[in-house]
Amino acid sequence: MARSDQFTVGIDFGTLSGRAVVVRVSDGAEVGSAVHYYAHGVMDTRLDAGAVALAPDWALQVPSDYVDVVGTAVPEAVRVAGIDPAQVVGIGTDFTACTVLPVLADGTPLCELPDYAERPHAYVKLWKHHAAQAQADRINELAHGRGETWIGRYGGLVSSEWEFAKGLQLLEEDPELYARADLFVEAADWIVWQLTGRYVRNACSAGYKGIYQDGRYPDRDFLAALNPGFAGFAEEKLAGEIGQLGEAAGRLTEAAAARTGLPAGTAVAVGNVDAHVTAPAARATAPGQMVAIMGTSTCHVMNHDVLVEVPGMCGVVDGGIVAGSWGYEAGQSGVGDIFGWFTHTSVPAAYTEAARAQGVSVHEHLTALAAKQQVGEHGLVALDWHSGNRSVLVDHELSGAVLGLTLTTRPEDVYRALLEATAFGTRVIVETFRDSGVPVEEFVVAGGLAKNALLMQIYADVTRLPLSLIGSEQGPALGSAIHAAVAARAYPDVPTAAKSMGKVRTGAFVPDEGRSQAYDALFEQYLALHDHFGRATTTMRRLKEIRRAAVAADREPAS
Amino acid sequence: MARSDQFTVGIDFGTLSGRAVVVRVSDGAEVGSAVHYYAHGVMDTRLDAGAVALAPDWALQVPSDYVDVVGTAVPEAVRVAGIDPAQVVGIGTDFTACTVLPVLADGTPLCELPDYAERPHAYVKLWKHHAAQAQADRINELAHGRGETWIGRYGGLVSSEWEFAKGLQLLEEDPELYARADLFVEAADWIVWQLTGRYVRNACSAGYKGIYQDGRYPDRDFLAALNPGFAGFAEEKLAGEIGQLGEAAGRLTEAAAARTGLPAGTAVAVGNVDAHVTAPAARATAPGQMVAIMGTSTCHVMNHDVLVEVPGMCGVVDGGIVAGSWGYEAGQSGVGDIFGWFTHTSVPAAYTEAARAQGVSVHEHLTALAAKQQVGEHGLVALDWHSGNRSVLVDHELSGAVLGLTLTTRPEDVYRALLEATAFGTRVIVETFRDSGVPVEEFVVAGGLAKNALLMQIYADVTRLPLSLIGSEQGPALGSAIHAAVAARAYPDVPTAAKSMGKVRTGAFVPDEGRSQAYDALFEQYLALHDHFGRATTTMRRLKEIRRAAVAADREPAS
């Protein structure tokens, strides 16, 4: 058994901050935690260095901010925990992805070279840097044109967020920097490199973001066809040993030990991605357990024994979630942010004032009103595509819709219809997995939306799945601490560690058959709209085209 | 020439009040006006007499309220005008329709008989009494089943608001009162009866609301098939001489002279309907001039030389607008009320506060913001069916929709999309008329929405029609005064009188070809949605069914 006097540290690198959590190895108790906000945050309009403006859709970060998390949040979390640093037996990390940076062979980020401080391409391209869409489009077109087998592993579409699109953008927009970069590395692996002195590519990022499938990357011919100068991208810039999740990437260096206050030689786990690392934190590493990290958007991850190509999934990767299993990822690009948009743009003063008077948020007020309704009573059905559709349809030109409006439609009616629309979107994903031979038997929710009981019950009713809730507010950090425990050999593997250290309220919500049947009727209408606007027609694509043309043609007087 | 020392009085009987306007015969100058609000207003939950509750969808009025308008507003308007009552040469009236009441042979309303004061069916059924839908459904089904030719004159659908549905409801729900009623009369004709002592059915109501076509009503066989007791409805209860619009129904009786303060013997015009009487007030009685009375809903009226059956029109009636022409009517069931619903339910506090700070209405604030946009910039398209679709599709089970929503969609975007949706709805009507051989060449707007310049420009751009505005705030009353002048023989016919007395700003808005082309692209998408949801699918009908089932099944605990 794992010893109750041993601890690991999980560090979750998010979009705006990094959080370190100290976790007891024997039972997963979270005994101390600290957050450090990145000094440079997200640079999306200009570089902090100089006055260099950034084009739309850019999003950069500064790698030294990550190192500051290691040097501040980690010792602070250990101090808060009140443990002896010598009791820490392992360190695990997880990161946003795909978040990548160009570095020298020794790991020095190009942005830290004085000559390049004012060159945007020298910095970390954050996951939500979307300025490589043109490159992604070419990659997809070429992959389908050439019949590349790997494109099927990504539901037929590689994202502009991923390594190849961002790397190709680097080459084509700043070829000097591209040439100077010895490696193009995931921040997830770069931070582990800073801790251990070793560069190991984690199997999760490499697979989901680096098109690493069946032991290889897209070949030279393919890359050369994109751009002759790109032929060696995979061999040269992505080169690196692949580390399986839960393995030790190495041991804490003397320098890193001095920075963190932890003992040199402490095991450091292979890097990981924030969504995927959450599965063991929720004790959900078995096939059939779909983990949904529900926040502004939703990421679904699930293991399965065999490889299947599920239409429109984000990706399937061998060992992408747990070593030895095929890890499946799907996603909904808009969930909580749709609800947030609605509360900010579409709720009248009477509602915001009533919420304030009751001391609750507008979300809580609308939810309480919506909860009084019978299923279908609002007469509405909505499409949850305000940010496009990431899984199954894989079309970012899609947009949101609300149908069934009457002069008696109230804000809580539309709000509930939007909650339901995201549940219907989940059901489409679940059914697509099921129909492809990857059954889903349990829906395990992590993330901020888990606290909305109405939303959770709707998901259970709509999907007819028992719904479990993760038992930690720091799912990714806990998941990293679990990986740290395995890297430290306190447990033989991640699923075993998850059994002791993960936390879940199993069956927190169960479907009600009456409501499920009522939702079947609404879902039938949702599906009809889904297929009509997502597959049969170009209406939404045309609306985007019309919009772009209108914005571009700013010549005539408005009216 | 008409004499400048002669005047007529137009009386417009609306839903909540009646308004009298004194108009100079020579030039249509409105020299005095007064309003009288009905003491009983609209009774839609209970009768004022006794404590008799009314079922949903009922809407009743008290006929003595109309008489009070004659006795108060008319003398007050004459007093305000500062003219000698002897200068009044004619009286004209218009009414909401179909607004009907059961009366004795002498015109006494059944509700004024003490025995019947607590019987809902004894009262005036207001136009918006919608409790005869079941009867209307049976009339429509039977008409189509028997291949009745008259059903085509009403776009294939008779409304629950009209005489036959309301009469059949009376028979089936209160047969004693049905038997006691000697006549079932339009309030438009009843008030003329009170003024003249003569019962004359105006051609407009008789045609549009009474299925009077080609000189006859639906036959006994048809009516008997609806209900054996209904066989004589037309012959017995609707019997009455038909009066053409602009004719004198008679002369002011001594009793009515005493009540109004006007000279006995003054010419009184045949009754009329508020929408239809507006056409001459806007000098728009020629073929090709479509008059749109735009308020909470829109009613379109237009003359044409020949009879054509336009798909989905509300009705076509010989002499229905101007004697000697075929009068066409179409309508949009939701227009201003959709905009009103949006401002009340979907606009956040920041907008209502900004409007208040600027001293403008929320409508004006949203309109100002929406006016800054290029056509199509919002990326949205909406369906204006929040109250169903009255013309072309003729389906009250349809509902509203908004498509193209993103996380950057703002209230002014949706507001503008709703304005445009109603313009697209108008274009569908205009094109349907045109495609049926009834060309529309000018769009003449009356009603409260005429003051929204952005909306007017959108209508001009979307329809590619020059748009004129009526020059009076009291279009119906002015139209009635015009009819009064013709009844008094100051002019030979209504079109001639309209030339002198009607008021219009011709070409107040003209289409901009650039914007019209941009709208073509959006209209194409609107039309695709229109046909998909209005014709090809049952989505919206199903949503209504689901809603009704949910409201009915209030057994299980809500969530």
Image (spheres, coloured by chain):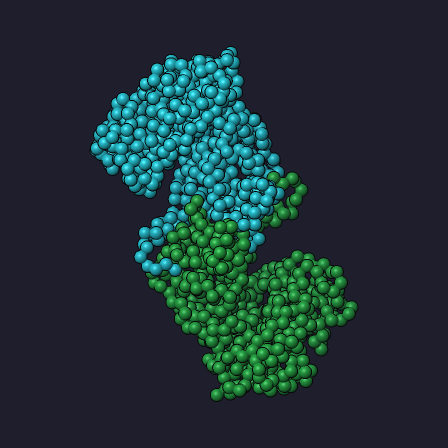
Chain colours: A cyan, B green
Q: Where is residue B553, by image quadrant?
A: top right
**Front-most of B58 and A449?**
A449
Side of A375 relative to A40 (left or right): right
Question: How many marks on residues?
Answer: 0
Nearest the viewer among B329 and B450 is: B450
Residue B523, quarter of the rendered image: bottom left
Quarter holding the C terminus of chain A is bottom left
- On the image, the x and y values in percent for residue B61 come to 67, 67
Q: Residue at x 48, y 48 (%)?
A: A345
Q: Residue at x 53, y 72 (%)?
A: B474
Q: Residue at x 47, y 15 (%)?
A: A84
- Seen from the viewer's position, the closer of residues A262 and B230 is A262
Q: Is residue A195 above or below residue B164?
A: above
Apparent side of residue A116 relative to residue B140 in the rendered image (left or right): left
In the displayed structure, A80 sits above or below B346; it is above
Residue B95, horizontal then vertical, whole percent: 59, 72
Query: Is A98 located above or below residue B286 in the figure?
Result: above
| Residue B17, position as x, y percentages in the image | 61, 69
Q: Is residue B31 left or right of residue A61?
A: right
Q: Residue at x 56, y 30 (%)?
A: A466
Can the viewer see residue B401?
no
**Which residue is nearer to you in this view: B54 or A77?**
A77
Q: Position of residue B365 (x, y in %)?
A: 46, 57
- Can residue B48 be seen at all in this image of the molecule? yes
